[in-house]
């Protein structure tokens, strides 16, 4: 009998048979409120009718039109629609399948465009599992251990994780920028530095938002030293944080933007955006791929962008995120085991700590499992898997938010009493 790898362990025992909006229906006959959204992928909810219709129509006409062989209409439509929401000046696109692929494409472009070997990465960042992407990932050793040697040239610099340091955001920001300057003086000369890559909100690293001062400080240093600012918006893009792009909270503009996850409502699609001038510096033949910009995925992505606009899902993420955060903070105020509630929009998390403030993965795990019993699906993150994150679909409404908070309160009560 053939089985899946034993290392593919599901976070919940649910066998999903159907999805609708913010809910999944299990083989057990139960309906579950899905606050995982496939790790932030099903942005328009499970099986949004307009996305389903677009994909079904495309499957019946052209499934695969390899985009370095022929051009196809869904890709042209998607490119035009992304042009309406991308930052000004980022007018050239290259598509891949996964976030890891897009990260590596951004790295390749940065190195080829600048002729420099090194890339600065922020401590706690997650950029993928392929060799180069894992080499740039520092959110946990589980993503980068056991297959050395990793790629050389990835230099780690601090991220302003105020709660972990025990500082306010201003102090953490000042420290992170001061250490970055030290890194540039002692480890990676600006003349050797192609780019710095950063998530506007750390994902696997614990849902820690950047600060305005930090990202603007990165922009200033990139301009001063001639390296590129790459923003990894794989998880924070397409409305997730209550703005279309996570960096919109901070008043900065990237040189390269990476997108994936919520872009196509569950179909595999990713991409990078840059100025046409910068993209033209990629070496001939360096961009390509068999399945990138698959016609069905592009049709789904174009429909996703239409739904996000027509149903005002960015504004909904902002409003529902505020409602969810308020409820999470109410629970945390009554729960000493929750040390911090943080995030942006519908990308929120609660960090579990022991009495002496150390990471508490055991309690976080009990709460996450107890939530399943309450009909709420959640995921863990953070270096010790001690942070419980919530990333519901952008279509979530007040009733679902309130349902989720009732389930969360019950799960926290059960998990912190040790009965889960």
Image (spheres, grey):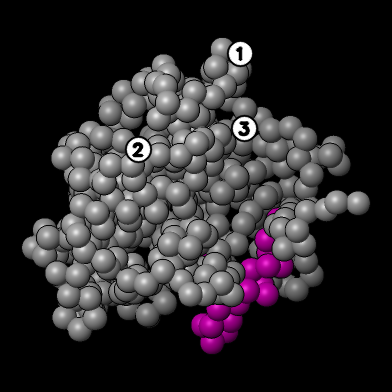
Give the magenta-colored segment's residue range. Answer: 350-371
Residue 48 highlighted magenta (yes or no): no
Instruction: Kindly indicate the quadrant of the structure image that contains residue 381.
Output: bottom right
198 left or right of 340? left
Q: Is the residue marked by circle 1 packed among few (<14), some (14-19), or many (20+) residues within 10 Å?
A: few
Q: Position of residue 21 (x, y in %)?
A: 61, 31
Label 2 vs label 3: CA separation? Answer: 27 Å
Q: Position of residue 75 (x, y in %)?
A: 40, 24
The residue lying toward the viewer, choosing from 3 and 46, is: 3
Q: Is the residue marked by circle 3 packed among few (<14), some (14-19), or many (20+) residues within 10 Å?
A: many
Residue lying at 77% horizontally and 62% vertically, measured from the top left: 6
- Label 1 sits on a secondary structure element that is loop
In the picture, the disc for residue 60 is 1
- Quarter the C terminus occupies: bottom right
Residue lying at 69% horizontally and 49% vertically, measured from the top left: 376
* Residue annotated with mark 2: 94
* Residue annotated with mark 3: 46
């Amino acid at each position: 009998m053939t089985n899946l790898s034993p290392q593919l362990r599901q976070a919940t025992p649910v066998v999903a048979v159907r999805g609708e909006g913010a809910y999944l229906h299990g083989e057990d006959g139960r309906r579950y409120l899905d606050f995982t959204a496939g790790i932030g992928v099903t942005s328009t909810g499970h099986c949004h009718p307009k996305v389903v219709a677009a994909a079904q129509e495309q499957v019946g006409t052209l499934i695969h039109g390899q985009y370095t062989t022929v051009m196809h209409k869904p890709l042209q439509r998607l490119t035009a629609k992304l042009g309406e929401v991308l930052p000004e000046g980022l007018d050239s696109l290259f598509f891949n399948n996964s976030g890891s692929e897009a990260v590596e494409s951004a790295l390749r472009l940065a190195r080829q465009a600048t002729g420099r070997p090194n890339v600065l990465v922020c401590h706690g960042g997650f950029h993928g599992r392929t060799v180069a992407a894992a080499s740039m990932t520092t959110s946990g050793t589980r993503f980068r251990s056991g297959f050395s040697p990793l790629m050389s040239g990835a230099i780690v610099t601090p991220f302003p994780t105020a709660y972990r340091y025990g500082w306010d955001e201003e102090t953490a920001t000042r420290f992170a920028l001061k250490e970055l300057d030290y890194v540039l003086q002692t480890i990676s000369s600006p003349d050797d530095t192609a780019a710095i890559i950063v998530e506007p909100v750390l994902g696997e690293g614990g849902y820690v938002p950047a600060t305005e001062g930090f990202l603007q400080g990165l922009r200033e240093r990139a301009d001063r030293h001639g390296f590129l600012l790459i923003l990894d918006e794989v998880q924070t893009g397409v409305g997730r944080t209550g703005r279309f792009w996570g960096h919109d909270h901070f008043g900065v503009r990237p040189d390269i933007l990476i997108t994936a996850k919520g872009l196509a409502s569950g179909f595999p699609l990713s991409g990078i955006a840059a100025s046409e001038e910068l993209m033209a510096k990629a070496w001939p033949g360096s961009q390509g791929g068999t399945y990138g910009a698959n016609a069905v995925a592009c049709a789904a992505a174009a429909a996703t962008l239409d739904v996000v606009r027509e149903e005002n899902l960015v504004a909904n993420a902002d409003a529902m995120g505020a409602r969810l955060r308020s409820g999470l903070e109410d629970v945390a105020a009554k729960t000493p085991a929750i040390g911090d509630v943080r995030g942006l929009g519908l990308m929120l998390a609660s960090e579990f700590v022991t009495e002496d403030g150390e990471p508490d993965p055991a309690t976080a795990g009990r709460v996450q499992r107890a939530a399943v019993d309450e009909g709420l699906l959640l995921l863990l993150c953070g270096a010790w898997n001690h942070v419980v994150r919530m990333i519901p679909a952008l279509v979530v409404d007040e009733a679902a938010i309130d349902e989720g908070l009732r389930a969360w309160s019950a799960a926290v009560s059960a998990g912190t009493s040790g009965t889960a």
